[in-house]
Image (tube, rainbow, N blue to C red):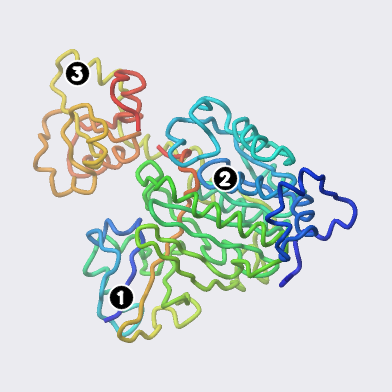
């Protein structure tokens, strides 16, 4: 089964797991299965109308699926998807309540 | 060994090294990739670092030691105790001083040949282009999305390379965004996350050593660009995982539809980045204003009067262990399942560290029928500052 690497900020929604194995023949299927298994993750990955959020990128291996076939990107056993959200930290002092 | 055009051209007679400098830089001078000509380029170079915080500290120190002639620093913050776990350019005796002063002192001590240009102000759409124009390379060590997008756009508009680094908890990212040669930050992430959706800085935390790892990568990339040696991180996103102790690399592509560096850019001047990131000043207050608030003074008075009032702490157990005021603990993410533990008839004051998470908790409580829940303004931090200094501030 393909593996999905979960970044630190989203691990709280996957019971702390850094890597989750999910079924799915395409990137879209795999992510869908991932968010079915961990429903709290959905709103962090998708907009209300089901599009991948613009501050979340998904890579198959080292290639952004936006430049492959998007959600239709084919996956085979052992393929690795990585979710890479934007992070802003640098000194962590300001503008936080 | 030049594999690409150096950012700084051979100073050819306009810059010389003193005997003291030759002795100081001897480990550079004996490497053919740097040599005398490269060291002169470094001396001629003008590097601007945005922020003298976690990332800015190590990178400014290493760039100073390496002999970068002019270091511009933009920062208007003051050194706080909680900075010292990672911002190694500042020391314990600097607490309360402007970061700019303490950074300048440290840099002068490391290498008095470095000229520090201080910009003790917030980087803004009004001043960014003017500040950037006289520098060869910009190093982004900021801690928030509005400034990141501002730095990116200003770099694209002025044609400067943006040496990017970002950190969160145990993970870091680094790249070189340079629209002339490859993608920019907006090609990677067209839009920032809406405020509140990703954990904020106060909730997130960071391993103190992590900015050291990422900041030194940024310093390395900066020196490579100045000298024109090696392969810079243009078109590559380097991911560092301190827990797994692994580096990974992702391919980045230039987005032809990028609103800033694409074929038909829609952003041709700097915009309002607070608004772009969904946090205009008026709105920043809005989340908090939507829920009823109580000040720590008022809370103290009501508790002292023996009023029937419960206090709920929605932070995490490991934060409770560091500091608490004896309130019942239900972490925010467990609250929806544990509402039954709360008495709906008793007024409820909800606090967290500084008031962000508790505002969300109060909103949730209101939505589930609690009529009498209040957000404690400023959280346990305000309690420590205004009511009981024996409660540690973290």
Q: Disc 1: which chain?
A: A
Alpha carbons under labels 2 and 3: distance apart? 44 Å
Residue at 48 percent across and 45 percent down: it is B279
**As drawn, is B310 to the left or to the right of B217?**
left
Instruction: State the image coordinates of residue B110 (x, y, percent, origin top left).
Output: 64, 39
> Is circle 1 on the same chain as circle 2?
no
Q: Position of residue B307 (x, y in %)?
A: 15, 18
A39 left or right, relative to A67: left
* Image mark 3: chain: B
Position of the C terminus of chain A, as image quadrant, is top left
Q: Which residue is mark 2?
A: B56
Which residue is under mark 1? Answer: A3
- Foreground disc of the pair 2, 3: 2
List the residue tagged with mark 3. B303
Horizontal placement of B73 versus A66: left or right? right
Q: Which element is circle 1 on?
A: strand
Does the CB distance between marks 1 and 2 fall below 8 Å? no
Question: Which residue is most to the top?
Answer: B305
Q: Position of residue B218 (x, y in %)?
A: 58, 56
The quarter holding residue B392 reads: top left
């Amino acid at each position: 089964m393909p593996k999905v690497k979960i970044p630190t900020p989203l691990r709280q929604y996957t019971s702390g797991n850094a890597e989750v194995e999910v079924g799915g023949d395409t990137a879209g299927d795999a992510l869908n299965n991932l968010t079915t298994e961990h429903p709290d993750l959905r709103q962090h990955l998708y907009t209300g109308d089901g599009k991948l959020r613009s501050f979340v990128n998904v890579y198959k291996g080292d290639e952004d699926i936006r430049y492959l076939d998007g959600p239709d990107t084919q996956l085979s056993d052992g393929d690795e998807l990585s979710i890479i959200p934007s992070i802003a930290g640098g000194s962590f002092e300001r503008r936080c309540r | 060994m030049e594999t690409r055009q150096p950012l700084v051209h051979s100073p050819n007679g306009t810059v010389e090294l003193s005997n003291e400098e030759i002795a100081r830089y001897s480990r550079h001078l004996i490497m053919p990739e740097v040599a005398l000509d490269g060291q002169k380029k470094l001396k001629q170079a003008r590097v601007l670092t945005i922020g003298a915080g976690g990332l800015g500290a190590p990178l400014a120190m290493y760039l100073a030691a390496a002999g970068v002639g002019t270091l511009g620093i933009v920062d208007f913050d003051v050194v706080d105790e909680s900075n010292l776990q990672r911002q190694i350019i500042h020391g314990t005796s600097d607490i309360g001083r402007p970061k700019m002063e303490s950074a300048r002192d440290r840099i002068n001590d490391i290498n008095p040949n470095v000229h520090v240009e201080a910009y003790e102000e917030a980087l803004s759409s009004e001043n960014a282009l003017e500040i950037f124009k006289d520098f060869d390379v910009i190093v982004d060590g900021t801690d928030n999305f509005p400034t990141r997008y501002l730095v990116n756009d200003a770099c694209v508009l002025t044609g400067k390379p943006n040496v990017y680094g970002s950190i969160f908890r145990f993970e870091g990212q680094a790249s070189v965004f340079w629209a002339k040669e490859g993608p920019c930050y907006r090609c990677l992430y067209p839009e920032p996350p809406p405020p509140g959706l990703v954990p904020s800085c106060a909730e997130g935390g960071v391993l103190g050593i992590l900015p050291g790892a990422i900041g030194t990568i940024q310093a390395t990339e900066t020196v490579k660009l100045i000298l024109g040696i090696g392969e810079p991180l243009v078109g590559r996103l380097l991911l560092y995982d301190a827990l797994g102790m692994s580096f990974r690399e992702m391919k980045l592509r230039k987005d032809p539809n990028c609103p800033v560096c694409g074929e038909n850019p829609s952003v041709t001047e700097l915009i309002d980045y607070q608004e772009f990131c969904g946090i205009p000043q008026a709105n920043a207050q809005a989340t908090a204003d939507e829920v009823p608030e109580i000040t720590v003074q008022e809370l103290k008075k009501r508790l002292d009067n023996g009023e029937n009032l419960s206090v709920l702490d929605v932070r995490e157990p490991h934060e409770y262990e560091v500091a608490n005021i004896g309130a019942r603990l239900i972490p925010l993410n467990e609250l929806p399942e544990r509402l039954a533990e709360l008495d709906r008839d008793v007024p409820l004051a909800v606090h967290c560290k500084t008031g962000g998470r508790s505002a969300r908790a109060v909103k949730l409580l209101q939505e589930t029928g609690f009529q009498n829940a209040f957000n404690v303004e400023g959280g346990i931090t305000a309690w420590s500052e205004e009511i009981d200094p024996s409660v540690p501030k973290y």
